[in-house]
Image: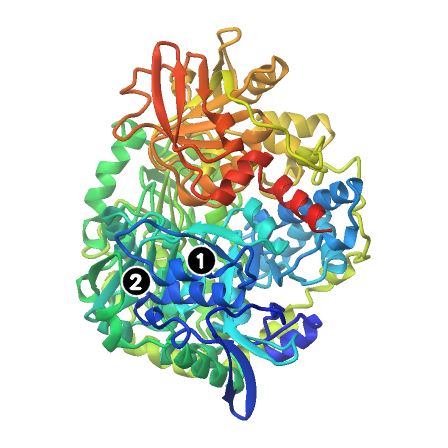
């Protein structure tokens, strides 16, 4: 969308505008980049790239966008000519320059966004306490918070499932939603997209993203690229439209919201040349699962990927967005598809006005941001890879990681190998009473949850239409849903149900149990809701290796449902197929899904739709008016949302008896100037962990078990177990979250004597205890903590509590073999030192047991500079750990004890 300074929500909805004021009349314009262009009789200010910086023409598209950002925000002090020169002269094989980046806007989902607003509320109080004016501490860029992570799929398989789940959602989350209403009424530039409107990334694609922004806050309207950071790791989905953006932690997002630039080292940029065309029957899901496998194996962590080549013509914008969505799963920071005619087609198809399209084309062509296939060979990429779309075959991924792709033809064999690790080589069976009263004997691999969900696939009309067509053929042939399977349909926006209904496909999905349960992120975030107790109880009692099949992007252990042992990612039509089969122990390419009404076996090939059928339905069912009308009606929220109080108050009225929202302690004792840093002495190891520890392992997600420390705490406050809600919903109460820290039942801590879950040794007493109890004991004794880990520490969701929690319990450093990008930033943002073992070394090779006392020398050097290494001494072992504080700005965060006190002090100084 195109826009400028935020008007009312209604005006923005009518005009399709993203608005952001960034003009500076005293801009030094060292490169003579400031200029005016005419588009359809209108004049716009731009900062020309190619004339001002001729070498920009050989930069990757993503770096051209960053270069324009520097030119436009040049102030001669923070953003100076030297930064422009450094980026313009970028050498793919040389040292990475450090630059500043001002995102045009910020998007948030509610699980991470609500804590950001609580942080802002607490920061505003501290700001006032230290002498600042409350209204000064407000968002400085447009912020859209989409409420999509709260709703749970409790009710399913009935026509009223959507209405009942929405009612439960409002009842459970009323306090959080009242906070959101207060924030929207109080903070300028903040817009809340109400519950059950859609998933953040699909809303971003269909409504918020503009590709180019028109800013009319100055004397002359200005055009510049739409750029975004988001508090969800899958923010790069919008890269599919040529919008540069990526996920950041909620901690970093707060600074961006307050107008502080992000600091980054220019990453390596990998050009991925796409060739060929997908075979008929191959879906965008198959393509992205194959790409995820190959790019993860190639090694693209922290890089930008840019797609080019003749294969682009074979991918719709929705297909591109599907591929860009799983950018975190293959480890890259961004995955940019350049702007071309296909992007304009998508913008038109989703209801953007023609004036908008004219501006996008004119600006992109003028600035060298329009895709030029002939120039691909001249672009300065760090390296180039090729990917043949014709090589892709139907696939799924699992049972634990999204990069573990399995060709559909070998799934039965792969499952047999994987299940032996889950059940210990002993096959299990369970006698199950289904919700309809029928009894069944289920074996390992029984599919108990089939979920069409998540931003990855439900934003792609071709995939959703394919699921509907497969359902129609299955019903027409007489196939029946398996009664033990919980089937759910949670699209990314109401537009999906509109075009499915227009095509008459929704009724067939209903008949197979895939009734609409919500518009929200359900299964991927652990909000799939409970299995029917008759099924769940039998699974728990027997230890059955049960299975979930979902059209999402994450399938980590313990994430989807506590009663599901194995999780597989699949395209929406394959989710329906596995629900019909009812088991993973099947070869869908050769064996029947079931028996039709005529007594004959029905195979997947009998009901799989071809691309011609899908295209024909899409042409008649998907209409631009659907998108504009749907969003115009939904942005105001339902009656429950509109009935919530929305009274602007400068300071948030905290409720002392609230079990959902409590003032966070981050600013207790914060002074106007930071205290000097000192070295770490006498630290003990809280956890000694292995490879691929995810933020799910560190920070709690999903339902709160009644027997857990958090559950006991809530019961003591008088909250009945039925009202516990999820950890995510209670993320604004640090007392609840601290009790869930490191409590994932799949966590393996080497100090815990073989026990899984949140256990550790209290080295002060030698006792095996819970993580929380040990942390409290260490804190009372004044003992600092460290965490040891292997490769890819903090992979998965950009969950800020995975850094906030450890900081609050006294973790001063994490020593790992390597870090996931966002989590490393989050640790720095909370003042925790991310340290890496020397190359080729880890806790095992160094002989560390985790029982040692740790001294870390060299930390005090941060007062002057950023040390490349610090000296770690643990008992008789000493080594130099690599300091992963990557920029000068990050060093400031460490000096100040985190990004929030640093930002607060900066605002005080400015005021």
Q: Nearer the viewer, residue 275 or 701?
A: 275
Q: Nearer the viewer, residue 711 or 824?
A: 824
Tell me the residue at 35%/50% (across/down).
96
**Marks 2/1: CA distance?**
67 Å
The location of residue 555, given as percent across then percent down, is: 39, 45
Position of residue 317 relative to residue 333, above or below, is below
Q: Which residue is mark 2?
A: 596
Q: In what element is the residue under mark 1?
A: helix
Asked if 660 appears above or below 844 in the picture, the reply is: below
Classify mark 2: residues with Cα within 10 Å, few (<14), some (14-19) or many (20+).
Answer: some
Q: Is 445 left or right of 621, judged from the image as shown?
A: left
Between 615 and 200, the residue placed more toward the observer is 200
Mark 2 element type? loop
Q: Quick one: label 1, few (<14), some, or many (20+) residues within 10 Å?
A: some
Residue visible at 41% across and 81% down? 366
Q: Quadrant of residue 905?
A: top right
- Disc 1 target residue: 83
x and y percentages locating residue 238 in the rendered image = 45, 64
Tell me residue 805's x, y (percent). 57, 32
């Amino acid at each position: 969308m195109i826009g400028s300074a935020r008007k009312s929500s209604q005006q923005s909805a009518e005009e399709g505008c993203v608005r952001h004021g960034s003009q500076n009349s005293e801009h030094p314009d060292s490169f003579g980049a400031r200029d005016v262009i005419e588009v359809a009789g209108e004049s716009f200010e731009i900062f020309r790239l190619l004339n001002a910086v001729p070498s920009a023409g050989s930069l990757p598209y993503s770096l051209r966008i960053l270069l324009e950002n520097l030119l436009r925000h040049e102030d001669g002090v923070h953003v100076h000519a030297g930064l422009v020169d450094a980026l313009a002269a970028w050498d793919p094989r040389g040292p990475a320059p450090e630059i500043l980046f001002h995102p045009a806007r910020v998007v948030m989902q509610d699980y991470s966004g609500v804590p950001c607003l609580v942080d802002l509320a607490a920061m505003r109080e501290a700001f006032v306490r230290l002498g600042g004016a409350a209204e000064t501490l407000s968002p400085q860029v447009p912020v859209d918070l989409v409420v999509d992570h709260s709703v749970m799929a409790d009710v399913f398989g009935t026509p009223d499932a959507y209405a009942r789940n929405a009612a439960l959602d409002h009842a459970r989350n009323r306090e959080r939603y009242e906070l959101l209403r207060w924030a929207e009424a109080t903070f300028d530039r903040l817009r809340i997209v109400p519950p059950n409107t859609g998933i953040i990334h699909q809303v971003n694609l269909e409504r918020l993203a503009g590709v180019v922004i028109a800013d009319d806050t100055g004397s002359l309207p200005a055009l510049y690229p739409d750029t975004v950071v988001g508090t969800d790791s899958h923010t790069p989905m919008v890269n599919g439209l040529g919008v540069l953006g990526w996920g950041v932690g909620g901690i970093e997002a707060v600074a961006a919201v307050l107008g502080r630039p992000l600091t980054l080292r220019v990453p390596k940029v990998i050009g991925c040349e796409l060739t060929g065309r997908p075979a008929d029957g191959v879906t965008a899901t198959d393509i992205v699962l194959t790409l995820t496998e190959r790019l993860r194996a190639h090694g693209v962590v922290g890089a930008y990927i840019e797609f080019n080549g003749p294969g682009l013509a074979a991918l719709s914008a929705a297909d591109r967005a599907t591929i860009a969505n799983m950018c975190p799963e293959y480890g890259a920071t961004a995955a940019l598809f350049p702007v071309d005619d296909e992007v304009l087609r998508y913008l038109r198809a989703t209801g953007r006005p023609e004036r908008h399209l004219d501006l996008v084309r004119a600006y992109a062509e003028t600035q060298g941001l329009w895709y030029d296939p002939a120039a691909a060979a001249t672009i300065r990429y760090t390296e180039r890879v090729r990917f043949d779309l014709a090589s892709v075959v139907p696939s799924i991924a699992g049972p634990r990681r999204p990069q573990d792709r399995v060709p559909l033809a070998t799934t039965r064999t792969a499952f047999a190998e994987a299940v032996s690790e889950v059940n210990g080589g002993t096959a299990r069976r369970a006698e199950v009473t289904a919700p309809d009263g029928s009894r069944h004997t289920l074996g390992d691999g029984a599919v108990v949850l089939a979920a069409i969900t998540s931003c990855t696939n439900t934003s792609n009309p071709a995939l959703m239409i394919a699921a509907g067509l497969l359902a129609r053929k299955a019903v027409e042939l007489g196939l029946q849903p398996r009664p033990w399977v919980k089937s759910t349909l949670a699209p990314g926006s109401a537009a999906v149900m509109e075009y499915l209904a227009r095509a008459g496909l929704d009724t067939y999905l209903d008949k197979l149990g895939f009734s609409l349960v919500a518009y929200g992120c359900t299964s991927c975030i652990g909000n799939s809701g409970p299995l029917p107790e008759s099924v769940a109880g039998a699974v728990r009692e027997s230890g059955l290796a049960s299975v979930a099949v979902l059209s999402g992007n994450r399938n980590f252990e313990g994430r989807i449902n506590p009663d599901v042992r194995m999780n597989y990612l699949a395209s929406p039509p394959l989710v329906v197929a596995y629900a019909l089969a009812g088991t993973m122990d099947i070869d869908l390419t050769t064996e029947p899904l079931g028996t039709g009404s005529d007594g004959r076996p029905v195979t997947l090939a009998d009901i799989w739709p071809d691309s011609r059928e899908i295209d024909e339905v899409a042409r008649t069912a998907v209409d631009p008016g659907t998108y504009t009308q749907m969003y115009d009606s939904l942005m105001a929220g339902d009656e429950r949302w509109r009935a919530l109080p929305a009274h602007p108050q400068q300071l948030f009225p905290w409720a002392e008896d609230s079990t959902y929202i409590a003032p966070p302690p981050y600013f207790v004792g914060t002074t106007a100037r930071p205290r000097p840093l000192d070295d770490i002495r006498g630290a003990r190891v809280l956890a000694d962990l292995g490879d691929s520890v995810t933020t799910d392992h560190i920070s709690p997600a999903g339902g709160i078990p009644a027997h857990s420390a958090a559950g006991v705490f809530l019961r003591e406050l008088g909250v009945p177990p039925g009202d516990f809600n999820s950890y995510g919903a209670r993320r604004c109460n640090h007392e609840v979250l601290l009790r869930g820290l490191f409590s994932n039942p799949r966590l393996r801590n080497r100090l815990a004597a073989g026990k899984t879950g949140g256990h550790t040794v209290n080295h002060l007493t030698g006792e095996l205890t819970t993580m929380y109890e040990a942390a409290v004991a260490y804190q009372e004794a004044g003992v600092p903590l460290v965490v040891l880990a292997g490769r890819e520490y903090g992979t998965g969701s950009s969950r800020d509590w995975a850094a906030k929690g450890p900081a609050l319990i006294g973790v001063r450093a994490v020593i790992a073999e390597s870090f996931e990008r966002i989590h490393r930033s989050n640790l720095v943002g909370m003042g925790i030192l991310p340290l890496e073992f020397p190359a080729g070394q880890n806790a095992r090779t160094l002989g560390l047991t985790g029982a040692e006392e740790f001294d870390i020398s060299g930390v005090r050097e941060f007062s002057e500079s950023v040390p490349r290494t610090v000296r770690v001494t643990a008992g008789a072992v000493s080594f130099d750990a690599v300091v992963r504080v990557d920029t000068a700005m990050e060093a400031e965060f460490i000096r100040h004890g985190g990004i929030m006190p640093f930002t607060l002090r900066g605002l005080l100084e400015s005021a």
